[in-house]
Image (cartoon, rainbow, N blue to C red):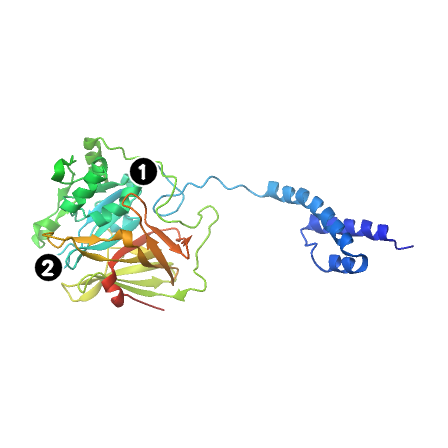
Amino acid sequence: MKITRRLLLQCSAAMAGCLAFTGASTNGGFLDWLQGVLGKGVASSSSSMAASSAPAASSQAASSAPSLPAYDADPLTGQAKSGNGRIIAVMVNNICNSARQNARPQRGLSSASIVIESRVEGSISRLCALYSNVDAIPEVGPLRSGRDQFLQLVMPWKALYYHDGESIFCTQYINQWNYSGLNIGGKSYFNTPTHPHVAHRDPRDGVVAYEHTEFTSGPEIRQAAQNAGIGLTYDYDTTFFPFTDYRTGEIELLEGCQAARSVTVRHSAKYQSAFSYSAADKVYRMQMYSARTGAFENAVDELNGQQLVFENLLVCFAPIAAYAGDSGDVQEVQYIAGGPAYLFTRGRVRVCQWSKQAPDLPLEVTDNGQPVTFNRGRTYLAIVDEDEEGYFTFNA
């Protein structure tokens, strides 16, 4: 049988078609050999014929692949959404200076999807617990007054901001940004409309001071919202952080990043939060320093005795100082400055940057200009004075 150029062309086309149908590459040895024998024109012809066969095979594969449902994630955890509840942000006391000046152990924090901690006056830090649905809120507290550094973080999400009282600076933001319609428990500075909160007292055996005995709950928050005419449903089409996709089971392992199984965040000498990574549970377990005992203690939910755990820790450093003038040492966070951030997940740390361009824009976390992905689950978010960065530690 005489091997002609036409025959080789026919054979090469048939081989290319077979390779395309089976998913093998046509860019390897066969075409290289053929090109050496017959020149570039033959390889080009073979590649063209293979390409013409590929769409049919690709189409067949695509039609057999299952299509994903529309992405519809819980705005605070990235898990599949279970409802259309409005985000509820509750201010929680964190004082722990003595047996009488003591808010710990708090209640309801193990049910929160995000817990935010930042310094509020002098050395004292405060917590803000975020829930994606009012029905997910058990008894929570002790309830405390609002501060604008927390308000600014939840404002972009049209969250219901729930507290008992607020600083004049917090009211100033509410007035300027027209947020009184979603603010419950505020003050009437600047003739700002107010909506009373609903709560109850637990004397806690009479040991702690009265100001640390106020609690609220999902039903009470619902009642306060109803009294104020505030709707508790909201259809979120994005999430607080960019999360891994629950539909595919994607996991962010931070491969190539430094191991970080223990983390200590210092807000002041007396208010520090420490975390240790549990490889078995894939979570960070929380402790808090107690000035009352002079030691770190497990941060537990008084309702169930469970230690607080988080899939993600995000630590953001920012300029923080007392507001100018006679401010009572109320602290101001300079969000517009942005700064360094550290994301801890799956026992590793990713060094990145955070930014927040305006009070009504969300906090963003990037690495070389690209959004940083969080693992699905609960997140501890710390906004820390840049002067405390030297005390910030993490170790393998």
Q: What x and y, as percent, mark residue 137?
A: 26, 43
Depth check, front residue: 179 or 377: 179
- Is disc 2 placed on a helix, strand or loop? loop
Q: Mark 2 points at which residue?
A: 99
Mark sitting on residue 338: none
- Is disc 1 placed on a helix, strand or loop? loop
Depth check, front residue: 46 or 312: 46
**Mark 1 to mark 2: distance in Å?**
38 Å
Quadrant for the N terminus in the image? bottom right
Q: What x and y, as percent, mark residue 197?
A: 16, 38
Quadrant for the C terminus in the image? bottom left
- Residue type, mark 1 in image: Gly
Q: Mark 1 points at which residue?
A: 85
- Density class for disc 2 (Cα within 10 Å; few <14, some 14-19, many ≥20) is some
Depth check, front residue: 168 or 357: 357
- Residue type, mark 2 in image: Ala
The residue most toward the right is 1
Q: What x and y, as percent, mark residue 37?
A: 81, 59
Q: Residue at x 42, y 57 (%)?
A: 368
Q: Which residue is drawn at 65% across and 42% down?
A: 60
